[in-house]
Amino acid sequence: MPIDDIPELGFASLAVRAGQQRTFEGEHAEPIFATSSFVFANAAEAAARFSGTVAGNIYSRFTNPTVRVFQERLAALEGGETCIATSSGMAAILATCMALLKSGDHIVSANSIFGSTISLFTNYLSKFGIATSYVPLSNLAAWEAAIRPETRLFYLETPSNPLMELADIRALADLAHAHGCLLVVDNCFCTPALQQPFPLGADLVIHSATKYLDGQGRCVGGAVVGDRQRVGVDIYGFLRTAGPTLSPFNAWVFLKGLETLSLRMRAHSESALHLARWLEAQPAVERVYYPGLPSHPQHELAKRQQSDFGGIVSFELHGGREAAWALIDATQMISITANLGDAKTTITHPATTTHGRLTPQERETAGIREGLVRISVGLETVADIQRDLERGFQRIASHSDLSATRGEATDR
Ligand SMILES: *Cc1c(COP(=O)(O)O)cnc(C)c1O
């Protein structure tokens, strides 16, 4: 029986099985269709496919069977009608804007979104007459005040990066719809394993599959999930014409990633909560940003809107940049890299990396201070992650040569 015909499969079952259609070879794992084009039985079939009267593969920029399995699986996990995969998360955002907006339209966006998304809106869409207003993520009145007659889209990420601020998706969906706008949610940090924006009223869900959907830092890719007209026709139409579609190999890697998504998100969340509690008790730490802590101002919203709190923990050190860099440099196992959502724990100093291009004033407004450190908690033994950070706290406490190079006398 085809898996999609079995009613009421749970999330973890869908993550392992949704979308698969076996070929006549009876393969158990999903095959990689490494082919750029597809053949037709005769000229009439070719003509029928090209005219669209008969559905079927033509060329892998349009459709590819491996990519299709990934799309169907992710649509099932988000509870969306359909999904289109893209060559990166940014390509998913670009395709959404190109397909749904036109010159003269306006976006209201959270100001705490991914840096390249801000750059896309501000530096590129603006050239085509599409304007963007930025508002504080959790300030509903600010969203409302920014709406213009020509506003078409609300755009947000929740929780935000790196301060883990939340948006009330339902409240913003209601506001967007009351003004004839669409709500687009970048669900990268939570994934559908922890947060499903559609039942809360979102119209489109964006993914950078590069992060948790892959989960092991191997491939770049993305996706848009939503209704058949906007995603299946409009956004698909832009993608098959313009070309930033997903490669079958990357789709296959993401399929393998999805199979372990619920297990991984649970493990990331469990270790992150453990570390967040421990970090909150450290004298060198001024503040911990993690929605799973009762000290988080939106802890109740997080409990209501998410099924767990995710793998990203940020914390502010008393000692500013000197302390932050000392802590980062004292780690031995944790990777110093700005990527996130990997099985490997990563650590970064947002003020000088991901948010380094902002002016000091913009950073101050965004709450990105010099003592801020962000970790993406991986799947290693949590005691080892803690011990690695402890090395940093010891270095800060000893105050001896805070500028020493990292991991001295180790062969990392
Ligand atoms: C990484 C990221 C993106 C961009 O995705 P790419 O796959 O790098 O293009 C978009 N949104 C969020 C929240 C991200 O973390």
Image (cartoon, rainbow, N blue to C red):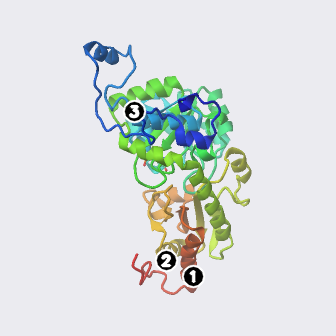
Residue 191 lies, in percent from the top left, at 56, 46
Crowd around label 1: few <14 · some 14–19 · many ≥20 (10 Å)? some
Mark yes or no: residue 202 visible.
Answer: yes
Give the image location of residue 302, x and y in percent: 69, 49
Badge 2 or badge 3: first in the primary sequence: 3
Does 296 sit above or below residue 158?
A: below
The label nearer to you, 2 versus 3, is 3
Where 160 falls versus 391 (above or below)? above
Q: Are marks 3 and 1 in contact (CB under 8 Å)?
A: no
For the point 62% across and 40% down, which residue is it? Answer: 196
Residue type indicated by callout 3: Pro
For this view, does 229 lie left or right of residue 25? right
Give me the disc on residue 330.
2
Q: Nearer the viewer, residue 106 or 33?
A: 33
Dot 2: element = helix
Task: Say which element carries label 1.
Answer: helix
| Drawn side of residue 307 relative to residue 360, left or right | right
Q: Residue 412 carries which label?
A: none
The residue labelled by disc 3 is: 65
Q: Mark on residue 394?
A: 1
Give, as a three-letter code, the residue at label 2: Ala
- Looking at marks 1 and 2 on the same chain, the residue that comes earlier in the sequence is marked by 2
Residue 167's image quarter?
top right
Q: Do the residues labelled 1 and 2 touch (CB within 8 Å)?
A: yes
Q: How far apart are marks 3 and 1 (CA)?
A: 53 Å
- As helix, strand or loop, the secondary structure at mark 3 comes to helix
Residue depicted at 31% across the width and 28% down the height? 59
In screen coordinates, is 20 left or right of 301? Answer: left
